[in-house]
Amino acid sequence: MRRARRGPPRPVRFRASALEALARPLDSIPETLDRLLAALVPECADACEIVLTDSDDAERRVVTRGGEIEAAIRGFDGLRRQALIGGAPISWRSAREPSLSCVVVCLLDDGRPLGTLACLARSAPPLDEADAAAIEDVASATAASIGRALLQARARVAARRSQRIASQLHQLLAASMIVAGLQREEDVLDAVARRARSVFDAEEVVVALESGPASPLKVAVHRERSRAARPREASDPPPAPGSGAPARTGQWLVAPLLARRSAARGSVSIRHRDGSSFSDDDLEVASLLAQLASSALDATELNRTIQQSEERLRVLVDTAPIGIVETDVDGGIRWWNRAAASLFSWGEDPDAPRSVVPAFPPPILDELEDLWAAAVDGREVPVRDLTSVELAGRRRVLAASAALVPPTVGREGSLLTVVEDVTDQRQLMEELRHAQRMDVIGQLSSSVAHDFNNLLTLIAGYATRASTLTGKLLTMGRTKLPEPIVFSPVQSVGELSDVLDRIIGGDIELELVLDPTTGMIRADPDQFEQMVMNLATNARDAMAEGGSLRIAIAPVVIDADAAASAGLPPGDYVRVVVTDTGSGMDEETVRRCFEPLFTTKGPAKGTGLGLPAARRVVQESGGTIQVHSVLGEGTTFEILFPTVDEEPLADVHAEPPAREAPGTTVLLAEDDDGIRELIGRILRHNGFVVYEAESAERAVEIAKDVPRSIELLVSDVVLGGMTGGELAAILQESDPELLVVLVSGNVDAAVLEDVREGTGTFLPKPFKPSELIGVIDELRSRRATAPR
């Protein structure tokens, strides 16, 4: 119970006591509140309570004085809320118990509520307005004191935090300088682990590498000891978070080590010795530390890759089969590889001390200096042949080129000169010209072997132009003087159609457009036909996937304007146009296509002589040849020959002899129209009834449909999809007594394996008509005398 005192009024007294208590130095907020309540109880009230709240209005500290305060004001929470919301003092007096009164005041620090101060009086006199005003003054002073104490506490925390972060960043900077020069992943992980333990004052740090060339690898550093092992032998912290950012997991702080593609390749795990938690600042520092470790690991991988690339490049250059020499921009030799040392008789070690400085042979220096000047000026440097050099007592041909190596920091620019000894290659090229020409003859001879034998067969029946074809083949294999005569180009190309078909193959469609009104020309006919075959061969090589070849011959009149642009006199001409749908030529190839020895077909495929020879034939005949080509679309050659108003030489033909007819029914299968016509004529001339088929499939159909039985099959062996032997086997399944004569120009009697024994014979091409009739008679006689 409070007792009345004499002297100054009660509000004046407890205000003075409270302010005096708050004016003394503060050691802590609890001490300050205890002093304040000691000044208020019982001077101001029988009981006092101070409730401090945090930012979300939750109670964080309650200080009371006076034994009855808790029970007495337990129901007054509403008064505290009103005071916090309104900020003004709340006075209350009990209606049931007039002596019971209460004043609740909000503690405001610069407008921010810190809590409430409640004073309770149970005896007279009750707390009045003067008491409330005094209590409000005390509350203001109390809030100011608490605010100062909180500010000082936050300042101390911020200072300690700043000092800690500064220390951590300083140690991170030192760590970055340490790991920057490390070359091995294990050394990087060990340095990062040691620095992390120091940065976080940790009990244990584990740095693990889960992927990469050095994985798996774990380095653990403890407060008292450190250990690095492969494979992992340290503690097992939780795995790195999948988000890519550091995370707190239990007592561990784990930061992922990210690769260049943001994929986790390991982690840095940190544990405090007392098990205390990590702050948000620790997360940021751990993220920086993980980035530092990742960058250092990237640097080690990149450095290893660079070293491996440099080593591979060094081995590649040193073992290259062509000479490589590095010089300064003035031509002074700095370095050379093994091939250059062998070529110029220099030492194989460019770094070895020597009394004589290596130098290029003087005869080629002028040409090399031209190449170097072009490289320094940024101009295109073509490969150049150096022919005036003698090495090891033998005159050599060198192919050389040069390239500029740009300057870099701390190093001047230089020149790389590439030199290759091509003497043997050039000699082989000379020898290859004749070999390639013979190869063309071999290819053509192989392609026309079947037709050639067919022609020889026709010789026996028609005395045709086989000698002319033989002359053409001989002309291709030897060099002879031109013998210009008057002939028909239309007739010449028409007679070449079969040969052209064999040259271009089955994948290319041949179209001949030959105007019969075309006049005569004067030229060497062999060279003319060789020109046409060369153009056809080039077209074939340009159409590897198939296509079409068109050869058109027609008369044309050239007027004065067109003749002037073509460099020809006006008049009547024969125009020969050869067009293919092949790969075409670029502008450079079109410009050089008539140069001797120029070819784009590669070694052993082209001689570079066909088009120059074609141009020579045309020019010697007073004509012109022009080419138009588009890449991917094809090439057209247009040739003009002056028309000659003279008669050509005539050909001589003969007829085969006749023979009495035996009346046998024959099925003739032959895909060559000329041979089929000849054999059919021979058989009919000798009294046979002949059914002709241009293919094996057609022969099968005829055998089923003819009104009389087939007694004899005469068939070529090569018929396209089905062979003659296979055709005979099919027909003999229904007629085992069927006699078979197989003819061919490039196979032997082994083709009779499919024919029933004793029923067949083989007749090689070429054969005479009498030989064909003879083998038929012999085969029929054999069957007549065979036992039944």
Image: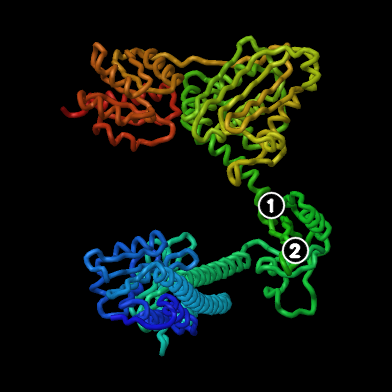
Q: Measured along the vertical axis of the image, is residue 485 above or below residue 726?
A: above
Q: In which quarter of the image is the N terminus?
A: bottom left
Looking at the picture, which amino acid does disc 1 mark?
A: Arg
Q: Position of residue 320 (x, y in %)?
A: 62, 63
Label of residue 226 in the image: none
Observer-nearest of 365 and 643: 365
Q: Where is residue 423 in the image (x, y as percent from the top left)?
A: 70, 56
Observer-nearest of 437 and 754: 437
Looking at the picture, which amino acid does disc 2 mark?
A: Ser
Query: Which residue is denoted by mark 2 in the rendering?
Result: 414
Q: Where is residue 404 in the image (x, y as percent from the top left)?
A: 73, 58
What kind of element bears circle 1?
helix
Query: Which residue is denoted by mark 1 in the rendering?
Result: 426
User: Which residue shows up at 54% across the image and 34% down it?
Assistant: 444
Furthest residue toward front: 6
Q: Is residue 738 left or right of residue 8?
A: left
